[in-house]
Image (cartoon, rainbow, N blue to C red):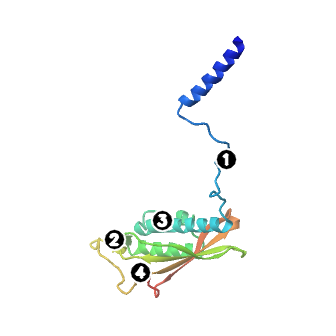
């Protein structure tokens, strides 16, 4: 009889300790999963990776345009770009450095996936963006001209901007921006 009493006390004590901790016993994993949790499709994951590469391209290229002489931007741009865009963009940064000038301000963008082609040998995703440059200005760094704006008055300030982002199996399936095409004739 004494043994039964000890076991009952142990069970009661354990139950009290659990309830005193402020936590409720958790349900088995199968009971906690909901029908709303699902595995993303290959297309959804590809779109996400392509958009991440595109955002990385903008983050690094904007930093490079703001400080073109600060360092060699090739390694950082190479994390998000491949040729022909990598070579073209590096030439643009070198041109800014040689003027000398830099960009000030921030672009406003609204990128969205406009085409997906995953069945090809080189899967690619096209991103269409509305590039708003109204608050971005080209500024001179020449002695005596510091702060002078060099904006081209004939260049549109808002226009469509397209990028092709390609998955490279040879580079650990990384998505990289291969081509960008500003459509200056298409305001947005």
Instruction: Report the residue marked by disc 3.
Output: 59
65 relative to 2 in the view: left or right: left
Q: CA distance from mark 4 to mark 1?
A: 51 Å
Mark 3 or mark 2, which has the lower sequence index?
Answer: 3
- The image shows a total of numbered marks equal to 4
Q: CA distance from mark 2 to mark 4?
A: 25 Å
Element marked by disc 3: helix
Please report the residue visible at 64 percent of the width from the left and 42 percent of the height from the top: 27
Q: CA distance from mark 3 to mark 1?
A: 42 Å
The crowding category of the residue bearing disc 3, from other C-alpha atoms within 10 Å (few below 14, some 14 to 19, many at least 20), is: few
Instruction: Report the residue marked by disc 1.
Output: 31
Q: CA distance from mark 2 to mark 1?
A: 64 Å
Circle 3 or circle 2, nearest the eye: 3
Counting from the top left corner in percent of width and height, residue 35 is at: 65, 57
The crowding category of the residue bearing disc 1, from other C-alpha atoms within 10 Å (few below 14, some 14 to 19, many at least 20), is: few
Please report the residue visible at 55 percent of the width from the left and 35 percent of the height from the top: 23
Circle 3 or circle 1, nearest the eye: 1
Relative depth, front residue between 184 and 45: 45
The crowding category of the residue bearing disc 2, from other C-alpha atoms within 10 Å (few below 14, some 14 to 19, many at least 20), is: some
Please report the residue visible at 66 percent of the width from the left and 20 percent of the height from the top: 8
Q: Give the quarter of the figure containing the C terminus.
A: bottom left
For this orientation, the residue located farthest to the top is: 2
Instruction: Report the residue marked by disc 2.
Output: 141
Mark 3 or mark 4, which has the lower sequence index?
Answer: 3
Circle 2 or circle 1, nearest the eye: 1
| Residue 150 image label | none
């Amino acid at each position: 009889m004494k043994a039964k009493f000890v076991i009952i006390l142990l069970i009661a004590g354990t139950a009290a300790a659990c309830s005193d901790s402020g936590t409720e016993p958790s349900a088995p994993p199968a009971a906690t999963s909901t029908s709303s949790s699902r595995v993303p499709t290959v297309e959804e994951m590809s779109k996400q990776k392509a958009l991440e590469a595109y955002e990385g391209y903008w983050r690094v290229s904007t930093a490079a345009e703001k400080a073109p002489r600060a360092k060699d931007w090739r390694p950082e741009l190479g994390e998000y770009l491949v040729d022909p865009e990598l070579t073209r963009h590096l030439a643009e940064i070198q041109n800014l450095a040689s003027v000398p000038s830099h960009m000030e301000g921030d672009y406003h963008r609204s990128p969205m996936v406009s085409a997906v082609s995953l069945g090809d040998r080189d899967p690619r995703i096209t991103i269409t963006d509305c590039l708003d440059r109204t608050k971005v200005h080209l500024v001179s760094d020449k002695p005596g001209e510091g702060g002078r704006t060099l904006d081209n008055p004939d260049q549109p300030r808002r226009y469509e901007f397209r990028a092709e982002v390609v998955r490279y199996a040879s580079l650990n399936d990384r998505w990289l921006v291969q081509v960008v095409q500003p459509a200056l004739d298409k305001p947005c």
